[in-house]
Amino acid sequence: MKFHFGAIPEDDFEPDDSWRALREPGPLLMQLFAFPIAIALLAIFAFLWKRFVAMEPLPIRQEHSMLFGLAAIASFPLLIIVHELFHAAAHPGYGRHPATIIGAWPVKLMFYAHYCGELKRNQFLLIFAMPFLAISVLPLVIAAVGILPPPLASVAAWFSIWNALFACGDVFCFFLVLSQIPPNAIVRNKGWYTFWKPA
């Protein structure tokens, strides 16, 4: 695993005529398209947690409220890091492969977990879905069946709901790939852009 600051790096991959380009927007336009998905996911997960999970407010004393507020703000960078690590966990070698790159792209307001190599289409889809399933869906299911005590469920709900919002781009790209690339295809990225060919 490597770390990178800036645009998604391009390796020496040069797609020939056997590769087809995915019809996809650039990073900023993608975020614009994904914005309605973000609002919808935020509303859906807030409703699901309220409807199906018994939660209690955390027992926070008034003198600790500012500290709790700072902890809530600090949870966002933590959530972003964990979110990207779950993307990487679906890479070959569970993210330990040298072709895995974790990065931040401040100009585009993006973080990413990029794999410089060929992937099967279904593994490519799993990479998009993994943080959404692991951080948003799984805690909701566990809490809904009563495994989490109510105060802990409140903490899980915080991360689940906000991660659902952050996953809007993943959801958009998941369905973009699902609708254009056949199941038996091989997929590879060149920087931001995606190419595929039949296996």
Image (tube, rainbow, N blue to C red):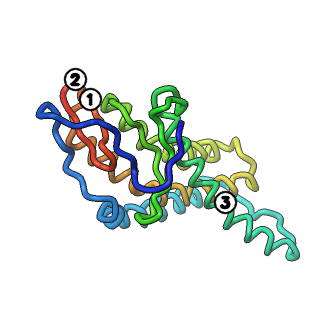
Out of 77 and 108, give the one closest to the viewer: 108
- Tell me the quadrant of the picture where the N terminus can be found: top right
Q: Amino acid at mark 3?
A: Ser
Give the vertical position of 184 relative to 100 (above or below): above
Q: Earlier in the sequence, mark 1 or mark 3?
A: 3
Tell me where residue 62 appears, x and y as whole percent.
Answer: 85, 76
Give the vertical position of 20 relative to 76 (above or below): above
**How many numbered discs sit on the rendered protein?**
3
Q: Label 2, on which residue?
A: 199
Q: CA distance from mark 1 to mark 3?
A: 36 Å
Q: Amino acid at mark 1?
A: Ile
Q: Residue at x 48, y 58 (%)?
A: 166
Q: Are marks 2 and 1 in contact (CB under 8 Å)?
A: yes
Q: Label 3, on which residue?
A: 75
Tell me where residue 130 appears, x and y as whole percent.
Answer: 48, 40
Q: Residues within 10 Å of mark 2 (few under 14, many from 20)?
A: few
Q: Is residue 35 left or right of residue 54?
A: left
Q: Amino acid at mark 2?
A: Ala
Q: Residues within 10 Å of mark 3 (few under 14, many from 20)?
A: some
Q: Label 1, on which residue?
A: 186
Q: Which of label 1 and label 3 is nearer to you?
A: 1
* Residue farthest left in this picture: 17
Tell me where residue 113 appears, x and y as whole percent.
Answer: 47, 44
Q: Is residue 189 left or right of residue 132?
A: left
Q: Quadrant of residue 18?
A: top left
Out of 25 and 18, give the one closest to the viewer: 18
